[in-house]
Image (cartoon, helix red, strand yellow):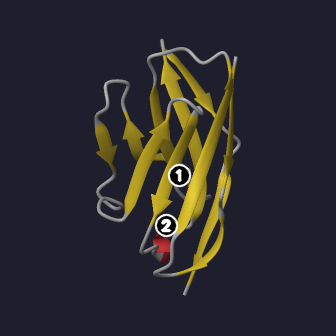
Amino acid sequence: QVQLVESGGGLVQAGGSLRLSCAASGTIPVPNDVSWYRQTPKTQRELVARISARGDYNYADSVRGRFTISRDNIKHMVFLQMDNLKLEDSATYYCNLYTRGNDYWGQGTQVTVSS
């Protein structure tokens, strides 16, 4: 089993930055894709950023140029650096690991951007 635990969320003013972390533990199959998703009470869960198993990067249009995803395969960590945050970035952010047809999710971390 794979366990994912997110951290780093919080309250930040518009224009500010946050860095989310995701710690993976358990038996982690490789290769795997790692991603960040977000969801609000009014929206479906949407992909924010992904690093594929072969190292391809994918970003949502709304965050490209402001957010950066990275991973540390030795420490089994995934990060999301979020800069120039906007009000519409407020959401619960979820870490995802996909491998061998299985999706694993963390419990989410709340990000609130204020004006």
Q: Which residue is mark 2?
A: 89
**For the residue marked with disc 1, what is the amino acid?**
Arg
Is 30 rendered above or below residue 43?
A: above
Residue in view at x 30 percent, y 40 percent:
57
The CA span between labels 2 and 1 is 9 Å
Residue in view at x 65 percent, y 61 percent:
9
Q: Which residue is mark 1?
A: 38
**How far across and how far down the image is residue 79, in percent?**
52, 48
Query: Cβ–Cβ below 8 Å for labels 2 and 1?
Result: yes
Q: Which quadrant holds the C terminus?
A: bottom right
Residue 45 in view of the camera: no
**How far across and how far down the image is residue 108, in percent?**
67, 48
Is 87 rendered above or below residue 19?
A: below
Which type of secondary structure does the marked residue at label 1 adopt?
strand
Front residue of this view, candidates 58 and 69: 69
Residue in view at x 46 percent, y 47 percent:
46
Which type of secondary structure does the marked residue at label 2 adopt?
helix
Front residue of this view, candidates 69 and 58: 69
Mark 2 burial class by Cα count in 10 Å: few <14, some 14-19, many 20+ = many
**For the residue marked with disc 2, what is the amino acid?**
Asp
**How far across and how far down the image is residue 58, in percent?**
31, 43
Is residue 24 found left or right of 43 in the rendered image? Answer: right
Mark 1 burial class by Cα count in 10 Å: few <14, some 14-19, many 20+ = many
